Image: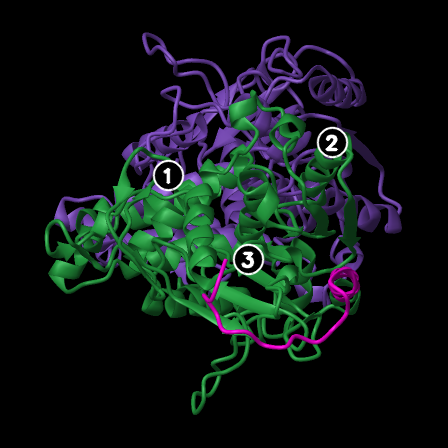
Chain colours: A purple, B green
């Protein structure tokens, strides 16, 4: 979907025009009440569910969650996945040409925030003729968007599902992001963000950034269980190649990531994470920041998530309770750390399924009679 | 102290000849029973205590612990600080010439282990005429050396003080070390370890490595307390410079470190950490590995240390208890994470002081009548 109305950004800059890439699953019902927006996290995209025909291994990133008969049942709900601005998976981002210069934006792509993304998503909803979402849902950075929706467009969202998220990053969270950024920014192949023109990619920096990130996505216990001190070649090699399986795994993850992810996007998205802090405008009072919300909430955290630990979710729950909002909170005892929000877990999926059942019954529990998109708002 | 007898290493290689730089504090007593060896961790040296004349800010790294009247009282004990092989603070290391080639070792400096260091330290003790240490003491990687001493030279060590340490690194510990190594190894200025010949230093890699390490030395709580989300310039800058104080702090630490630390040394020392695993030869049975120890032990951990958490110290304690060794264990409730072992804390210092009091009384509680070093073994 192309937009030619400029989008004013939190930074004071504006995007003159832009494109948002999105996918939809299921059908919008006649009263346009069954739409669910799924927001993505750091390295995901609009491709939430299903597979592309003829493309092996093209399952969407939340394919275990979203689809016919799944926890978010696309027989019942009309689901939208949208790629955020600044990403490298289709929506306007740093690798696209700046219409003002005719050259790729590179590092000059404006720094975008979670709130900017939400405003862009709201315009997409307008175009699709969706006045109010049955739910906005996301994990991690996606959960921040679901929370921001409830603050920025309180009347346009009936339910907010905030999973494995936080009301703001801690100093330690920011520290990990900044080291990752420094690895990219100091890679000689970064060329101040204009690496496209040099025909290179700052792979070393991206690789290290991803390795750092990946450590924080897994739990200490899970890593111990999966890799422990297992050796790749049976004995110590007394060199700087691979000794331990965990080294091999992380280097592989880093290599793979550096092949497909854009360095400027990585910088932008980590900044969006760092900047998210809805309580900031209220002197740090999260309850005050959430006072105008109207949605009902599902907040989910995972016991071994040390990136956005259960404590951080409880801060959100407490602020909502203080406002007498309806909030369901589930703390899932799961071994997989932050990554748990992407993985199959019977209790987790059960909680989400039950929550969507509730929404479905609130909507009248009838299967949608499809209407065309964009007909009327 | 120069050694011309080759030192066989755990890797199967050998160092043909080498120099160990050391400092001593206090006086050796007549029966040579009051010597304490202090072992250093990743980025420290033989300079444990005191200051160099005319040099401001030259306090030793454990100056709050070691000195006249301090917890490790140099009026009572003869303290030795020794710089380990492979370091960049004086003892033979990668920046020194390989006698076989006449060129700096660089990356060809053999990978050394905690056990190799202990054997080298034992030779130094021989030369100094010290048959048995009253104590060997260290924190973190230094604690591994204190533990290894009790295994490799059970009759030459009366007490082992193992502080903020672990019997082996976890997968997560190794992961952080390997990301740091990858940052260095992939820095174009590393030149396969021969950067000395190119007149450059892989500062980008060292800087990122140090930033990663530093995050793991501090506790989440301490970082939140000290930095939180404090901004450097009052508001978001919407760029990739410094926004948050924590970024400024970590970048400064990284810059400083990259100015003085050797990249090859960093690789070597992190490998020594990764490889330490005394239970490995006993099929993972730490109690079996510690069965031949004769020393008494003080084991200390810190509540907020998530690098080498209290659980890891308890593994050592349990293995010692299983062997009916005398062991004192203190878990200090301190906010400062792994770094706590270097910091002033009344309870921590009190425990160490009391423990040295015990040793002092075991030795007869008489002030040393100095003897010359190296007189007789």
Left-right relation of B95 to B209 = left
**Mark 3 and mark 2: span between their CA atoms?**
53 Å
Instruction: Tell me which corner region of the image, top left, top right, bottom left or bottom right, holds residue A193.
Output: bottom left
- Is B353 one of the magenta-colored residues? yes
- Most foreground residue, B60 or B274: B60
Left-right relation of A203 to A373 = left
Q: Which residues are magenta?
A: B351-377
Disc 3 with disc 2 on a shared chain = no
Rendered residue at 78%/30% (across/down): A330
Question: What residue would you read off at disc 2?
Answer: B323
Q: Do callouts 3 and 1 mark residues in contact (Cβ within 8 Å)?
A: no
Rendered residue at 59%/64% (across/down): B32
**Mark 2 and mark 1: span between their CA atoms?**
64 Å
Q: Residues within 10 Å of mark 2 (few under 14, many from 20)?
A: some
User: x, y (%) of residue A124?
Assistant: 49, 38
Q: Residue A275: which numbered mark, if any?
A: 3
Q: Quadrant of the N terminus of chain A?
A: top left
């Amino acid at each position: 979907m192309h937009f030619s109305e400029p989008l004013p950004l939190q930074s004071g800059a504006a995007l003159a025009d832009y494109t948002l890439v999105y996918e939809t699953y299921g059908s919008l019902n006649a009263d346009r009440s069954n739409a669910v927006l799924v927001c993505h996290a750091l390295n995901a995209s609009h491709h939430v569910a299903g597979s592309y025909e003829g493309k092996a291994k093209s399952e969407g990133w939340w394919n275990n969650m979203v689809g016919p008969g799944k926890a978010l049942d696309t027989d019942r709900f009309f689901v939208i996945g949208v790629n955020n601005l600044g990403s490298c998976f289709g929506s306007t981002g740093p690798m696209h040409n700046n219409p003002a210069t005719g050259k790729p934006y590179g590092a000059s792509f404006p720094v975008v925030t979670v709130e900017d993304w939400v405003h862009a998503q709201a315009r997409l909803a307008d175009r699709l003729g969706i006045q109010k979402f049955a739910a906005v849902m996301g994990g991690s950075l996606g959960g921040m968007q679901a929370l921001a929706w409830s603050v920025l467009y309180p009347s346009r969202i009936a339910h907010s599902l905030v999973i494995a998220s936080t009301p703001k990053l801690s100093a330690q969270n920011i520290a990990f992001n900044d080291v990752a950024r420094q690895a990219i920014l100091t890679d000689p192949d970064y060329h101040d963000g204009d690496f496209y023109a040099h025909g290179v990619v700052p792979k070393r920096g991206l690789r290290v950034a991803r390795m750092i990130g990946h450590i924080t996505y897994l739990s200490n216990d899970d890593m111990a269980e999966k890799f422990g001190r297992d050796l790749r070649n049976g004995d110590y090699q007394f060199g700087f190649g691979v000794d331990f399986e965990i080294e091999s795994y992380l280097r592989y993850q880093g290599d793979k990531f550096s092949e497909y992810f854009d360095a400027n996007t990585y910088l932008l998205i980590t900044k969006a994470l760092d900047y998210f802090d809805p309580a900031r405008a209220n002197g740090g009072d999260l309850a005050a920041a959430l006072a105008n919300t109207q949605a009902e909430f599902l907040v989910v955290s995972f016991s071994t998530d040390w990136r956005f630990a259960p404590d951080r979710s409880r801060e959100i729950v407490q602020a909502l309770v203080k406002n007498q909002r309806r909030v369901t909170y589930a703390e899932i005892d799961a071994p997989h750390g932050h990554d748990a929000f992407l993985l199959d877990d019977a209790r987790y999926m059960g909680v989400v399924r039950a929550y969507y059942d509730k929404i479905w019954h609130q909507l009248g529990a009838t299967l949608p009679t499809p209407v065309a998109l964009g007909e009327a708002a």
